[in-house]
Structure formats: C-alpha cells, structure tokens
Image: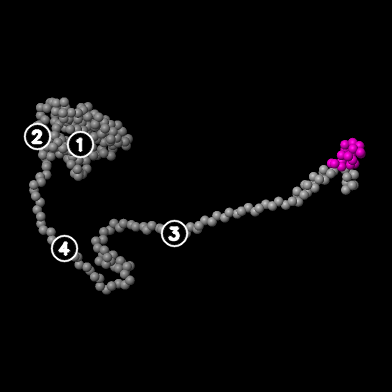
Amino acid sequence: MQKMIGRLQNVWHMVSGRSQARMDDESSAWAVSLGFHLSVILALGLVSLYRPASETVTLLAPSVPHVEPVIPEQFYFDADVVDDIGANSDLGVDVALAMAPRLDDVVEVLSPPDALAEIGPFEMSDALAVPTGLEYAEDRNIRGAVGVAATGATGAIDRITHEILMSLNDRKTLVVWLFDQSGSLQRQRQEIHDRFDRVYRELGVIEKSGDESFSRHRGVDNEAPLLSAIVSFGQQVQLRTEEPTSDVAKLKETLTAIETDDSGIERVFAAVIASVEEFQNYRRPDPRTREPRRNV
C-alpha cells in the first residue's frame, strides 16, 4: 500500500511540478477520498437487488361446442300431374316397395264416403236486370267496365266503339288517339289503320239511324258530337292534328303519315301528360250548364 502511494506521489510530482512536501499534504487526502469512493462503488456493485417476480395472468375462455351446419333439403316441383296417390297411383309399386317392410298380397281399396245430405234444385229470380246499352249511362257513369278482356290491338279497337257510344250518351266527346312510333309496332299501326275506318263507319251508321246518343247533341254550339285528335310519341311527343276534327279521311291520312322512330325511346307518360295539358279546356265547366264541354 505504501509503495502504491509512493508511486502515485512521484507521478503527481512529475505531472504537476509541485514540491514533494506539498504533494504529501494533498495526496494523502486525495488518496483517502479515492479509496473511499472505490470501496463504495465495489460495495454497491456487490449488493444484489431483489426483484419480485411478475405475476402471470392466465385467461381462460369457455370452450364453444362445435355445431354441425344444417344443410337445407332441396325440393323440386314435378310438372307431371298424378291423379292418384298411394298404392293406386302410377308410382304405386315403387312407393309400396320403398315404404313398406313387406309387400302385401292384397291391397285394400277404400270406397268413397256417401254424401251426407242431398241438395235440391233451386231457382234464381229474374228480378235483377243487368243494365245494358243506353241504360248504362243514365247515372252518368262512363268509366269502362273492369274484367273485360280484348285480344290484340284489333280487339281493343272493336271495344272502343262501344266505349265511345257510352260516352256520347252522356255528353259530346273528344277521342284522343295515342300512337307509338317504335318500329316494333309498325305492323300493329297498320292493323289499327284498317280497323280505324270501321270504328267511325259503325258510329256513322248509328248516327244516321237517329240514335239518341247523337241526336241529343244536335244544334248545340254547332259542333259535331264526336271529335278526334291524334298524338304520336317516340323520342318526341307530337300533336298530329292542329285542331280536333270529325273528318275521318283526314284522320286516316294523318295516321298513315306517322313515321317510324328507331331511337328505341318510348315516352308514353309524357304523351299522356301532354295530351291532358293540350285538351284540358274541354273539361272546364260551361258557365251556363256548369258541366264539362266534352268527355275526353
């Protein structure tokens, strides 16, 4: 220890250039401080620190039982009609073999039950008369009848004759014809053209016969009881007749002049709205009678 202190004193003397005596005074304190601090450092290095073990958290989840998915059964519809079922049906042999543990020798056929009561004849009264023809419009109900079927465009045209006559029985009438300009209906437009003359020819015959539907409107405002207008629709909605007319030849000429629209656009509802706006004046009440001028 003394040798180490002596060596340190010599090193200090050589480095600092101080005297030996001063070295002895300062080096002792420095050496003691150094030794003390080294001892403390060594002691701290040898001390073991206690570190408590960390707690382990274990999560337990309940086991979920495995459920097998239920495969839905597949059903199909057989279009073949089988009148009978069971052992008496067309598939009776296969059904019996598949369902019965053994095949019976005798098949029991059940007889149909007897009727519990007999229903006697009954008569219907003829007091209820079905209104037809002119009597149908006495209550001013001019709406078309429901449940009346007409086959094709020609059948609908034939039905229109009856509807126009019923409307004329109420008041003067304006018929607005709406025609589709699409190419797919070109053949039907020709069929309607062929039937067009028949409608007005039948109405003309009825008018000449003095039918009340026409005669009641004679001399009123000097206007024909029946007027017609033509509207066509496709990509555009066009009013083909400038004013409603009763000239059948002009109507047929206008119908023939309708060109085909190849755009594929059919503005049906726009044509209906345009027709309502164009001819709504005919539905305004007359100041004298307070009734619409015409049925449209």
Q: Secondary structure at mark 2?
A: helix
Residue 30 image offset from top left, x and y in percent: 84, 41
Q: Is residue 264 visible?
A: yes
- Residue 212 is marked as 2
Q: Dot 1, how many residues are within 10 Å of its Cα: few (below 14), some (14-19), or many (20+)? A: some
Q: Which residue is mark 4?
A: 116
Residue, x 78% and y 49% (percent of image)? 42
Three-letter residue code for mark 1: His
- The mark nearer the N terminus, 4 or 1, is 4
Q: Residue 35: horizontal and vertical position, in percent? A: 82, 45
Compare marks 4 and 3 and give the one earlier in the sequence. 3
Q: Give the residue furthest to the bottom.
A: 105
The label shown at residue 68 is 3
For marks 2 and 4, the one nearer the N-term is: 4
Boundaries of the magenta span: 9-30
| Residue picked out by circle 1 | 193
Do residues under tags 3 and 1 come within 8 Å of each other at their CB atoms? no
Of circles 2 and 4, the one toward us is 4
Q: CA distance from mark 2 to mark 3?
A: 81 Å
- Give me the C-alpha separation between circle 3 and circle 1: 69 Å
233 lies left or right of 11: left
Label 4 Cα crowd, 10 Å radius (few <14 / some 14-19 / many 20+): few
